[in-house]
Amino acid sequence: MDEGITKLLMKKVKKHRKWAEDVFVNPIYWEVNGKPYFMAGFMKNNIATATAYLTIGEETKEEVMLAQFPLALFANLSSSIFQIGEARMKVGSAFYINPLNIAVSTDNPKVLTGREAFAQLWDIQQKFNRLIKDFKHYYNYDVLVRKRITEEDIIKTQETANQVNMYQYLTVTTLLVRNDEIRAFANFLETTEGGKELDAEQLIFVKTITENKEALRYSLAMLDMIVDEDIEKMKELNYHYSLKKNKKIIEKQRQFIRFPKR
C-alpha cells in the first residue's frame, strides 16, 4: 500500500476513533466489485475495541459485508498462528536434543519408553517449527508483497491453523498419556552422571513439562477438537469443524464494525 493510499485511509478511519484509541490499517486487501477493501482497527490499551472496512472511494454496506468475512478471518487466523508459533519456538532445539543425547544406562522400562515419548515430542516440535517458518515466509514474502488476498490464501491459512491445532493436540496428549514415563526419564536424567552435562534450564524443562496435569487437561479442552484414532481423518474432521466455528466467530464480530454503520 503506497503512502498516498495509507494517508487517505488513515484520515478516514481517524474520524471514527474514540478518545485514547489508537488506529491502524491493515495493508492487506480483499477485492469486491473491482474495489480494494481494507480492514482497519481501533485499539485501546493494546486491546481491539472495533473495526472498520474502507476502500479508496465510497463504501457500501453490502460490499463491506462481503469484505469483512475474508479480511477478519485472515487477520484472526494469521495472528493466532504467529502467537502460538512464537510461544512454542521460544523453546530452542537444544532443550530436546541435549537430553536425548544422554546415553540411557538402565533397564527400567519406564525410562526407556519415557525417552521414546520425549523423542516423539521433539519430532512433533520439528514439524511444528517447519510449519510456522513456512507460513512466515509465505506471509512476509508473498502476501505482504502482493497485498491482495484471494480465496486460495483463506484456504491456506485455515489449513495452517488447523495443522497448528493438530500439533498442539498431539503434544498435549503425549504429555498426558505418557506422563509417568516422561517423568521417569526426567528423574533418570537428574540422577545420572550424563545428566549433569545438561544446562539447568534444559533439565528443568524435561522435569516440568509434565507436572501440571490440570493445566494440560485445560489446554486440551480449550482446543475443542473432534478426536479420532485415525490422525488423517481427525485432521479432515477438524478442518471442517473449524470452518463452522470460525464462521460463527466472524459473524459475531460484525457487531463491532464501527464504519460504515450497518
Image (tube, grey):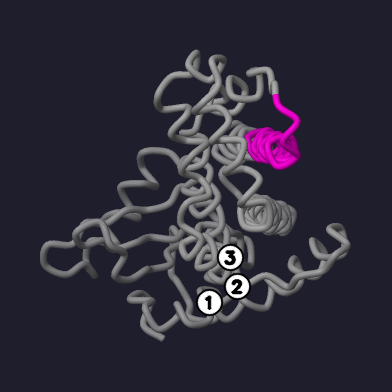
Whether residue 150 is visible here, answered yes or no, is: no
169 over 50 or under it: above or below: above
| Residue under the point 57% across and 71% down | 221
**Dot 3: what SS?**
helix
Q: Nearer the viewer, residue 237 or 65?
A: 237
Q: Which residue is mark 1?
A: 249
> In the image, which residues are magenta?
106-130
User: What's the residue type where badge 2 is placed?
Assistant: Asn
Q: Position of residue 155 (x, y in %)?
A: 73, 58
Give the image location of residue 197, x and y in percent. Answer: 50, 13
Give above or below for 180 relative to 219.
Answer: above
Q: Are marks 2 and 1 in contact (CB under 8 Å)?
A: yes
Residue at point 32% right, 53% down?
A: 24
Q: CA distance from mark 2 to mark 1?
A: 5 Å
User: Horizontal placement of 109 versus 81: left or right?
Assistant: right
- The secondary structure making up most of the magenta span is helix
Q: Which callout, 3 or 2, points at the residue further toward the start of the chain? A: 3
Residue 258 seen: yes
- Name the residue beneath numbered marker 3: 220
Left or right, residue 203 beside residue 131: left
The residue indicated by pointer 2 is 246
Q: From the viewer's perspective, is 35 left or right of 203?
A: right
The amino acid pointed to by label 3 is Leu
**Front residue of 144 and 97:** 97
Disc 2 crowd rating (10 Å Cα; few below 14, some 14-19, many 20+) is: some
